[in-house]
Amino acid sequence: MVAVLACAGLPGLATAPARAADRWASLASTVFRNYDRDQGMPHPVATALAQGRDGFIWIGTQGGLTRWDGYRFKGYEADPSVPGSLPDNWIQTLHVDSAGRLWVGTTSGRLARYDALHDRFDPISLALKPGQIHIGAIVDDGGGGLWVGTDDGLRHLNADAKVVSIVRAGMLGYPEGRTQAVLRDRSGALWVGTAAGFARRSPKGSAFAAVPLGGSMLGVSALFEGADGRLWIGTVRNGLFVIDRRGAVPRPIGVAAHLPPSSVSAIGVAGPHEIWATLRSSGIVSVDTSTEVATRILHDRTVPTSLAHDDVWTLLRDDAGSMWVGGTGGLSYHPRDSGQITTVFGTQQRPGGLSGSDVVSILATRDGHVWLGYLDGGVDVIDPMRGRIAALRPSRTRLDRSLPRDTVFAMTEGSGNRVYIGTRRGLYVADLSGRSVRLITVKGRDPRLPINALLYDAGILWVGGEYDGVWGIVPGATVRAVHRIVFSPSDTAALSNPDVNTLLRGRGRDMWAGTRDGLNRIDLGSRRIEAIPGDQSDPHALPAGFVAALQLDRTGRLWVGTFGGGLAVTTGRDARGRLRFRRFGLADGLPHLNVDSLSLDGSGTLWAGTDDGLARIDPRTLEIRAVRRADGGVLRDYFVGAHGATAAGEALLGAKDGLTVIRPGTPPVWRFAPRIMVTDLRIGGASVPVGPYNDTSVPAQIVITPDTNSLAVEFSALDFTAPEQNSFSYKLEGFDEHWTDTDPSRRLAAYTNLPPGDYTLRLRGTNRDGQWTERALALRISVLPASYQRLWFRIALMALLALAIVALLRGWTAHLRRRQRELERQIANRTADLSAANDRLTELAQIDMLTGCANRRHLLDRANEMIVFAARHDLPLSLTVLDLDNFKRVNDTWGHPGGDAVLAAAGHVLRHHGRAADLLGRIGGEEFALLMPNTAAQGARLHADQLRQALSELEVPVEGGDIRVTASFGVAQLRAGEDYDELYARADAALYAAKDAGRNQVKLCA
């Protein structure tokens, strides 16, 4: 949540003149992706943040340290029994020095330095007295050493991490109190903030000079030097100060009387002209450094993507320009985006915010305001600069003078300062100020019938009904005057369907009407209607009948959004005069085939809201690009017909949970080049520290011995903005002929039983826009030969074999010739008998003879092996349990022969539709189990639904008729540390949920 702080709320902050970028600022939300224990954090309170030179994000918590690679948290905890572990689990501060080394300050008063080569921590003594446990700040000294702020003043460490000097309170003018902030500025001056004061030491001086803040000595808790040289000072419960230039007096940016009574915990740059100051218990203050206008970023319990919690401890801007915030609610990540797309969430905890959550209709009026209609009823009038300025709230009384408590489907602006509103319960007219509303009665039409679409053109109000086609009405001179009907359902009897979703005024005399079953062109001059049906089989026809959205581009082409058929644009007419289309689907970049809304921005770019997010369409090149969260596309589920455009050129799209505002222009290409890093390395199944192999200057060589001839390398591309969109590839030069492509769920290069020799494993990845890194990470690998693979052993073995062959040939040649044919015959006969017997025994031991599936015993044996393999290689594995519905009724009706026939047929269908790697077994009666390796929950759910469909189409012929059968399915994905019984129990619970929900369906275990 973002709330604008006016001057009255923040004295000392100037008010900037309104700018284009300020539009929607009072309603816009700063969107975060939040991480806590559910995503792998070791503790829900994040206290410190740092980014290593290698690109990993380090997070200190009250329960240990963890490293984030975009996909997984790797934790480090204190354990006195393990050498090289952390000295304490409560991490107070993190610092990466000029040499790229990570330093960790803990509450035990002990400092530790991370040894990346050995993946361990080296303790550093600070010579603190017992009870002195605070390490508040760590900064470079400019000469390879460190300054460390503690309970007992400053400690100065040299490049060898030895304490060379101590500055305590009272010494050399050092202020009293716990040291909470230390900064060495670009000139070399040292600034320190303590719980009781603020002081500066000149670059060549030794003594500290006190620096009053606002005429008194205030506690200082955070310091930051901006790129412009200004020094920002965060205080203990007394707001922000800034020193504009060297030698200037600190001036207040906010004072305690107007900022929340909270300490500033951290300060950092968030953008070219933006500073963030985090507050304990009061969220974040964002300051525009050019105007010093501030906004507040707060947790909003109604918005899952808001700041995780208002108690904020720390912040970090990473190398991609994204912001990380740590606090009591865990870790909040705000990816850097172009700023082109603004998300306005519904029903926020802010004055002037949207009063509804789901925006179903949008109208941009000529006075610059935006009207929003909601799914649960009511309308807001929004000023993009100020927020909500008026609202029409639904009521249960006086239904002729208030909106109903039901969906507002459409709105259009008429003449005479009127706005017409179409709802599920009739047509209404409101004044442009949004202060009054009245029900409209149209002669011959039930006033409570739903209205899906409205269009006002040339003095005529066009109404698209849910059941009664299109009406054309000339409104009276006053609201109460009689309306004249110029177009009625009798004129639109030729419509492809009377359920009208959308109306669009075309060029010339054309008006377009999209219905639930086809598109229609209405010639307003002749009143002739051309019905254009959907036809999936014709590649040049309208792809689907349900037309949800219509839009004309600048060249006059008609774009049509459909349900199930994606997007289409007119290309002209064929020789028979039929309208022809070009289609666009998933393969062309659409995120979903249900296209709900279409809006043209001021640059001529077309934006589509779908059932799975936003898409950008360039009408000139016909290029389509899905817009995901990292690009600003936060909302996912858009509503039919919920679109509009402002006079400022902004495209507006309504969705579940709010409104998307898109400024005109071309979004920049994401060119961030992420580092490719090894995140886990196992040789012979044993974990090995990855640090030596991520050092690109002198990478270490991986040596594989004969007794550990297996290698598994997990790797990552450190683009955190949308890691789910990154792609990966690897190639073992000397072994692989081609690159092997993989996705974010399987970033693993694994090899076993490699021949002796030298190899190079090359790893590469993309950023979120699919741009490959210029340089792949190269790992040198040496596979050592076993003794039997060495040259001397092979020569000796060959000599011995030659001597043995000569001896055997001399002694046994005659005997072998006599017996050869007889022995061959006997061996062949016995081999055939044994093979047949073994095959039969194997079949009896492993196969359920009725269904042809694995029996229960074989399934359990193989299931445990598959679970061990999946856990060892960190691969997904899912279990589907299915049960034939109402099987007892089959036995009761058709007898056991009929039941057996159904089981046999079901087994055949399941085996026929199965995959080679899956394991299918019958575990009792009419119940089956299916284990799917390398398959996550959503993939397993999709496959289960395909099996369910196949079974529902099965007809089993028996004496007396055909038996039809359905099945219910439960799906669960293997969790870390889970065995088969636990996995089966969750899948079985999902199966019972499917049964309880009505059978013949698939349920996924949460």
Image: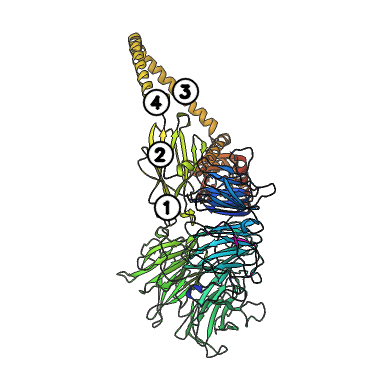
Given this view, does label 4 or label 2 mark the residue nearer the observer? 2
Residue at horizontal 39%, vertical 25%? 789
Q: Under tag 3, what secondary structure?
A: helix
Q: Give the range drawn in magenta.
A: 202-222
Foreground label between 1 and 2:
2
Residue furthest right as drawn = 131
| Distance from Cα at disc 3 to Cα at disc 1 | 55 Å
Q: Can residue 587 be seen in this view?
A: yes
Q: Mark 2 and mark 1 in contact (Cβ < 8 Å)?
A: no
Q: Distance between the residues labelled 1 and 2?
A: 22 Å
Residue 465 in view: no
Tell me the residue that label 4 is attached to.
789
Say what amino acid the circle numbered 2 marks: Arg
Which residue is tagged 3? 834
Q: Is residue 279 left or right of residue 647?
A: right
Estimate the spatial distance between the alpha carbons at disc 4 and disc 3, rounded to whole Å.
35 Å
Residue under the image location 66 percent in, 61 percent down? 196
**Residue 112 horizontal/vertical position (percent):** 58, 45
* Residue for badge 1: 766
Disc 2 crowd, CA 10 A, few/some/many (<14, 14-19, 20+): some
The 10 Å Cα crowd at callout 3, few under 14, some 14 to 19, many 20 or more, is few
Q: Tell me which numbered mark, 4 or 2, is placed earlier along the sequence.
A: 2
Q: What residue type is labelled 4?
A: Gln
Circles 3, 2 touching at the beta carbon (< 8 Å): no
In the image, residue 329 sits, relative to residue 707, either above or below, namely below
Kindly check if marks 1 and 4 are in contact, taking CB atoms under 8 A apart as contact.
Answer: no
Q: Which of marks 3 and 1 is nearer the N terminus?
A: 1
Residue at 37%, 68% in the rendered image = 619
